[in-house]
Image: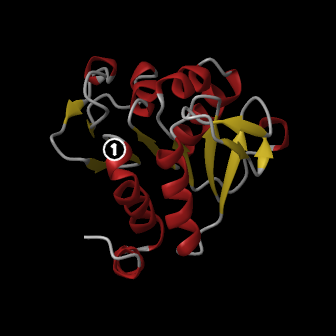
């Protein structure tokens, strides 16, 4: 199962595009409202999460996703629940995915040390010990990072590729008329 964590201030496209791509690939993905079931995006759109943090159980975690949105990432980083899930995910080798400001959370935890990574321009110093890439989406081992909203679909397709294969990701890419 893939879990995506949402807190008030998250970037809507960076959260919803990966969920859409994963569901098109028939990959189980659950959105988790870290502080509440209804979470408000950075542009004021309320989203109802599938579950809340209190309903989450760390079983069969294949991947976790941290969407961007500066305030959303700040709110996620303040959560001891999110911190512990990231620790467990890293320990068990689950795929850890973050976009835009999201990789800063991973950088603060030293999870990207020695890894190629990318983030929204201006957040590079938070990726402590990472090798900053010029790419829009980067996979290095168990980590996928991406620059921002404009590559949200590409980010989602990269997660699909890593979990269920390039053929399925390419098929989805073609079906949605993505370049």
Q: Is the residue marked by circle 1 packed among few (<14), some (14-19), or many (20+) residues within 10 Å?
A: many
Would you place residue 28 above or below residue 85 in this image? below
Q: Residue 168: percent from the left, percent from the top?
A: 42, 79
Residue positioned 31% across, 71% down in the render: 178
In the shown orientation, is residue 140 left or right of residue 42? left
Q: Residue 50: percent from the left, percent from the top?
A: 76, 52
Residue positioned 31% across, 20% down in the render: 128
Would you place residue 165 above or below residue 74 in this image? below
How many marks the image carries: the answer is: 1
Residue positioned 26% across, 32% down in the render: 114
Q: Residue 73: percent from the left, percent from the top?
A: 52, 26
In the shown orientation, is residue 112 left or right of residue 164? left
Can residue 155 be seen here? The reply is yes
* Residue 87 or residue 179, whichever sits in front: 179
Residue positioned 25% across, 28% down in the render: 121
Q: In the rendered view of the protein, which quadrant contains the N terminus?
A: bottom right
Would you place residue 47 above or below residue 107 in this image? below
Image colouring = secondary structure
Q: Which residue in the structure is indicated by mark 1?
A: 146
Query: Which residue is most to the left?
Result: 134
Q: In the rendered view of the protein, which quadrant contains the C terminus?
A: bottom left
The image quarter containing residue 35 is top right
* Residue 50 or residue 162, whichever sits in front: 50
The image quarter containing residue 44 is top right
Secondary structure, mark 1, is: strand
């Amino acid at each position: 199962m893939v879990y995506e964590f949402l807190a008030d201030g998250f970037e809507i496209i960076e959260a919803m595009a990966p969920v859409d791509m994963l569901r098109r690939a028939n990959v189980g993905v659950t959105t988790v409202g870290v502080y509440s079931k209804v979470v408000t995006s950075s542009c004021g759109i309320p989203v109802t999460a599938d579950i809340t943090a209190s309903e989450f159980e760390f079983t069969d975690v294949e991947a976790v996703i941290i969407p961007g949105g500066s305030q959303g990432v700040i709110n996620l980083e303040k959560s001891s629940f999110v911190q512990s899930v990231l620790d467990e995910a890293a320990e068990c080798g689950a795929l850890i995915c973050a976009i835009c400001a999201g990789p800063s959370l991973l950088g603060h935890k030293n999870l990207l040390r020695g890894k190629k990574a990318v983030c929204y321009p201006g957040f590079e110093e938070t990726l402590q010990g990472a090798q900053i890439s010029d790419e829009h989406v980067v996979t290095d081992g168990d980590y996928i990072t991406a620059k921002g909203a404009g590559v949200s679909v590409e980010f989602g397709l990269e997660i699909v590729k890593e979990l269920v294969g390039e053929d399925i990701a390419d098929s989805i890419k073609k079906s949605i008329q993505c370049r």
